[in-house]
Image: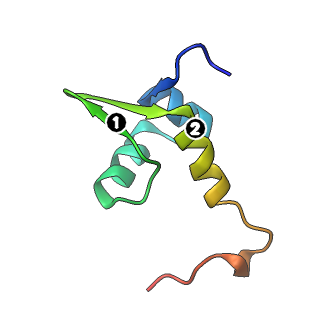
Amino acid sequence: MPESPLATADEAAEFLRTTTQRLAQDRYQGTGPRFIKHGRRVLYRWDDLRAYVDANTYQRTDDRPVAV
C-alpha cells in the first residue's frame, strides 16, 4: 500500500492506466472514482480507487449495464 492514503491525479491515472485528462472528464460527468477537492488540487483515496475498479469489473461484456 502506498505511504499516503491519498493519491494525486497523476498517481490515480497511473493506477487506472488512463490519463489525467480522462479523469478530469469523468469528474465533470460524474462517472469516475470519488475524489477530494482541496483548493485547486484534486486528490483520490486509494480505497476509493480500488472500489471504483471493483465496481467496474465484469465477467462478460454483456454484464455491463446498457447505456441509455
Q: Residue furthest left?
A: 39
Residue, far right: 59
Quarter of the image for residue 2 reads: top right
- Vertical placement of residue 53 versus 39, above or below: below
Quarter of the rendering containing residue 41 = top left
User: Residue at horizontal 64%, vertical 76%?
Assistant: 64
The image position of residue 5, as x and y in percent, is 52, 23
Quadrant housing the C terminus: bottom left
How far apart are labels 1 and 2 at the CA level? Answer: 13 Å
Decide: is 9 above or below 32. above
Q: Is residue 59 visible from the viewing direction of this image?
A: yes
Q: Quadrant of the N terminus?
A: top right
The colour style of the image is rainbow
Residue type of the residue flagged with mark 1: Ile
Mark carried by residue 47:
2
Q: Mark yes or no: residue 17 visible.
A: no
Q: Residue furthest top?
A: 3
Compared to 61, does 8 lie above or below?
above
Provide the secondary structure element on which disc 2 rests.
helix
* Residue at 38% from the left image edge and 42% from the top image edge: 21
Q: Amino acid at mark 2?
A: Asp
User: Which residue sits at x=21%, y=28%?
Assistant: 40
Per the rendering, the mark at residue 36 is: 1
61 left or right of 66 in image: right
User: Dot 2, how many residues are within 10 Å of its Cα: few (below 14), some (14-19), or many (20+)?
Assistant: few
20 or 3, which lies in front?
3
- Is 2 displayed left or right of 35 in the figure? right
Quarter-wise, where is residue 15 in the image?
top right
Tell whether label 2 touches label 1 (CB within 8 Å).
no
Name the secondary structure under disc 1.
Answer: strand
Residue 37 screen position, x and y as percent: 27, 34
Q: Is residue 66 above or below residue 29?
A: below
